[in-house]
Image: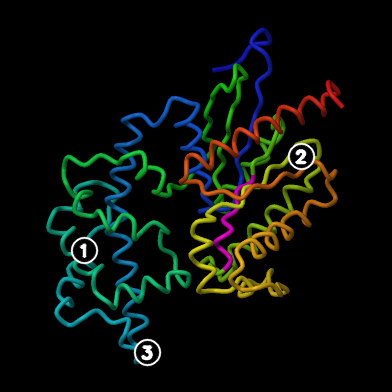
Amino acid sequence: GSYSEEEGVSYQLLLLGAGSSGKSTICKQIRLMYGHGLDGRLLHSFTSLIRGRMIESMQTLLQESTKRSDSKDSKFAVRPENAAVAETVLKLEAAEDSVGLTKKVALDIKQLWEDPGIQNTHERRAEFNIPENTAYFMSKIEEISDPEYLASTDDALRISSKTSGLVTTHFEYNGTGFTLIDVGGQESERRKWAAAFKSATSVLFIAAISSYDQYYFDKKNKLVDALELFEQLVNLPELSHTSFVLFLNKIDVFKEKIGRTPINVCPALKGYQGNERDINAATSYIEQKFLEKGKKKESNRVFSHITCAIDQKNVRKIFESVIQTVIGNALTAGGLIG
């Protein structure tokens, strides 16, 4: 609830970032660590979401496989003996309810997932929109289709769910009250952000460092979008006294990807001259690109961290240092320390 004067100050942390940056995962982690956790009702809603997503993901893979195998490249084609199964799965309604993913449907999807054509299509996933944790969920699809299955905490952290409107989480840390406000990242949601700016102590901006080779439907590069969004926010007059904490997230996906795809495929990173596989050099280069956007801000106002939102130890360590920063900064800004 609200914190009265006697209970001390309450700090407002605003969680911003582009869609699918891992923002909702950070929010879930904080609820698990300091708030009231993920209750049964939430886990039930994630269970339905995961089941619907399994059907949707396989339908996307089948459509993409067809698109690619038409161009005389048969390595993307589904094997002839799986054609009938593919037809059946494409006809399914991918409703976000648990009914669609029966045991039989799960076995069909599993059979298709193991098809080399589908695996080769999945390898090219940067070229189309599919959830990043598809392989994780596919590996346990039989368990997910079990009527008794309930999403585990780990599953809940890995399923991406769109945030719409403002999702507020109150929590305490060492006796200090905090309110975390998670704001939807999709383009259509961004108009709603201004309302939350007024009372923000700090902005936590989440960007997926791994999105350098990914594109939106309108052909815009996702990392370019994140850089532009960060630049707009960090220079807003109404946020001029607010500290910014940049989370370059999904470092786990980034490490796995950099071995296959150099970062200079991203229009904003064309100037990268470093070793293509040097994770530290590539990460620093991207970090600099973000920090340059905020250079008009007083130098001590942007702090950056490399994160992996699904790794609780990583999030806890970083979040605790962020909290110290936020408190220290708010006291400085208020003239209490300085």
Sequence-earlier tag: 3 or 2: 3
On the image, the x and y values in percent for residue 180 come to 58, 32
- The boundaries of the magenta stretch are 205-212
- From the image, tell me which residue sits under label 3: 71
Q: How far apart are marks 3 and 2 (CA)?
A: 50 Å
Above or below residue 61? Residue 189 is: above
Q: Residue furthest top?
A: 6
Q: Are marks 3 and 1 in contact (CB under 8 Å)?
A: no
Q: Judging from the image, what secondary structure is the residue with disc 2 in?
A: helix
- From the image, tell me which residue sits under label 1: 110
Sequence-earlier tag: 3 or 1: 3
307 to the left or right of 97: right
* Residue drawn at 85 percent across, 43 percent down: 298
Instruction: Say what amino acid the circle numbered 3 marks.
Output: Ser
Q: Residues within 10 Å of mark 3 (few under 14, many from 20)?
A: few
On the image, the x and y values in percent for residue 324 come to 68, 30
- From the image, tell me which residue sits under label 2: 239
Q: How far apart are marks 3 and 1 (CA)?
A: 26 Å
Sequence-earlier tag: 1 or 2: 1
- Quadrant assignment, res 269: bottom right
